[in-house]
Image (cartoon, rainbow, N blue to C red):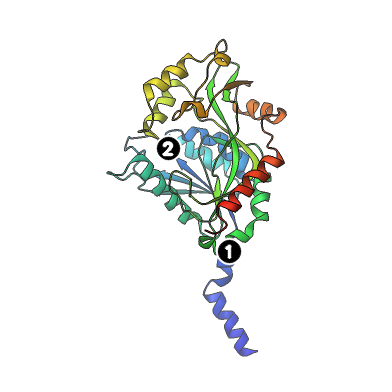
Amino acid sequence: LLRCTKILDLFISCDYFTTLNSMNKIQVGFLVSYDYELLKNAIPPIYEDSDTIFLAIDQRRKTWKGSDIAIDASFFEWIKNFDTANKIEIFEDDFYVEGLSTMECEVRERKMLAEKMGIGNWLIQLDSDEYFLDFKKFVKFLKRNNHYLQNPEEHIVQICPFKINLYKNSEEGVFYVDQLDKFMAATNYPNYKIGRHGKCRSIYTDSVALHECLSRTREDLIVKLENWGHNTDIDQEAFMAKWDSVNTGNYKSLQGFFYLNPMEWKDLEYMPGKNIAELLQNFKKSSKIKVSSFFLWKKNLGQRLKFLFK
């Protein structure tokens, strides 16, 4: 009995139980930059069902391109007032490295953030302009798959919900891409290669988020195009000419809106709503956020077969 007591004391002194208790959490991380104000839309939908929310901010206030940004003190005051459960943690470091491309800086920051969030947990990385419609449902799906958190580096997976890409605002609503687009929101191990893409098995789920991708003021959109991870991949002049031309009178007659290969976003549709709260409600009432069970089964079967022997 004495020997067993000593062994138990040893485990406790080595923080064994603390380590166990710290695993299998729902950890959410955001990369904070020039569009930090959008976090006031992104954080509330995920706050209740997250264990910790990490905000990664370059301590020299640099973008991945090396441009200077300013984050107003009122934003940190908003965080302080909103964070009633003390879930939000600021993670500051040097995320811009001279000589690296914007994409290399992005991948580096995502890996650093994931290490901070803690391997052994669900690592969810979202952008400031991604707003979940039902985060609780997504978290339930993750928890049903907690077995992937055991020895995660041996069985790396990325969990893919879908998003609706918002293209351009009008006075009464928003033009959006008329298709659901997968995105890599969570992983059990940060094997990021391009952005959040881990080049590993994807598991698809029917959760949906709104992505305020391009639906910004013209000035804010140009700032994004010049500083994000795809800044060297875009013909900015041609893209902005198309974006400028879209209005309620012609959007149905135009095609090809993606910033890389235009026809990947073939058509636009229109949803009324004067702010994000109204848009979220209107999309929830529509049929645009429904993902069929057969589609999910087909996508997940394909991934199982693709990675069966890898």
Residue at (33% x, 37% y) in the render: 65
In the rendered image of this protein, does residue 155 appear above or below residue 231?
below
Q: Amino acid at mark 1?
A: Gln
* Residue 49 showing in the rendered view: no
Density class for disc 1 (Cα within 10 Å; few <14, some 14-19, many ≥20) is: some
Q: Amino acid at mark 2?
A: Ser
Mark closer to the observer (1, 2): 1
Residue at (56% x, 57% y) in the render: 121
Residue at (55% x, 15% y) in the render: 251
Mark number for residue 33? 2
* Residue 307 showing in the rendered view: yes
Label 2: element kind: loop
Quadrant of the rendered structure where residue 62 is?
A: top left
Mark number for residue 278? none
Percent position (x, y) of residue 44?
A: 60, 39
Percent position (x, y) of residue 156?
A: 53, 56
In the rendered image of this protein, does residue 18 appear above or below residue 235?
below
Q: Earlier in the sequence, mark 1 or mark 2?
A: 2
Q: Is residue 116 left or right of residue 233?
A: right
Comparing 112 with 152, the one in front is: 152
Outermost residue to the left: 99
Residue that label 1 marks? 150
Look at the image and tell me in which quarter the N terminus lies: bottom right
Give the Cα separation between the discs numbered 1 and 2: 33 Å
Density class for disc 2 (Cα within 10 Å; few <14, some 14-19, many ≥20) is: many
Percent position (x, y) of residue 310?
A: 52, 58
Outermost residue to the bottom: 2
Label 1: element kind: loop
